[in-house]
Image (cartoon, rainbow, N blue to C red):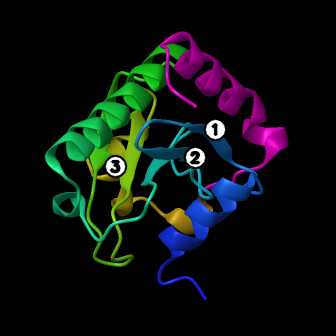
Amino acid sequence: MPATQIHALVECCRTGKYPALISKLRSGWVVMSEQQVLPGYCLLLPDPVVPHLNGLSLPERAQFLADMALVGDALLQVTDALRINYAMFGNMEPALHAHIFPRYANELLASKNAQPWASDWTMAPKYSDLGYGALRGRIESELNRKGKIS
């Protein structure tokens, strides 16, 4: 049994069985979140999994952060997001992973200036190829255009 959900997600990505998998980057895997609390919400999962950012060597850390920003660049290019929010906590899942949230002008006023965890996640649409597959494909194409390594 995997140590954390992050370990399990990385293993699914390695086998190509994760439905919301976007792409392999130099530092790990980029996937769309199972809960699309904001359209295009992605996660960057390091491969191999480490406990936290400080568990990476300096070059690995620089690559992970560069890949995180690359995903943000792709989201800015393929969505109508105004900006990108980035978050790394590891309190609930004690393994490094980055949350990458596109933020939009049309968000409800109550949540527009709040962090995404203030939203009602029970109301967030779940990822499906039907609902988000086209967006996933656009993100992947943009990452390929930007020269990601797969």
Q: Are marks 1 and 2 in contact (CB under 8 Å)?
A: yes
Q: Are marks 2 and 3 in contact (CB under 8 Å)?
A: no
**Secondary structure of the residue carrying numbered label 1:** strand
Disc 3 target residue:
110
Q: Return the disc, 2 or 3, that comes first in the chain's sequence.
A: 2
Say whether residue 125 is magenta.
yes
- Main SS of the magenta part reads helix
Q: Which mark is residue 22?
A: 1
Disc 1 and disc 2: Cα gap in Å? 5 Å
Which kind of residue does numbered mark 3 sit on?
Ala
Disc 2 target residue:
31
Residue 137, placed above or below residue 29: above
Give the quarter of the figure containing the C terminus. top right
Residue found at the far top of this picture: 145
Query: Does the rendering let one see residue 126?
Result: no
Residue 142 pos. (x, y %): 56, 16
Query: Does the rendering let one see residue 62?
Result: yes
| Residue occupying the point 33% across, 66% down | 50
Residue 31, placed above or below residue 14: above
Q: Which residues are magenta?
A: 124-150
Q: Which mark is residue 149?
A: none
Q: Nearer the viewer, residue 106 or 41?
A: 41
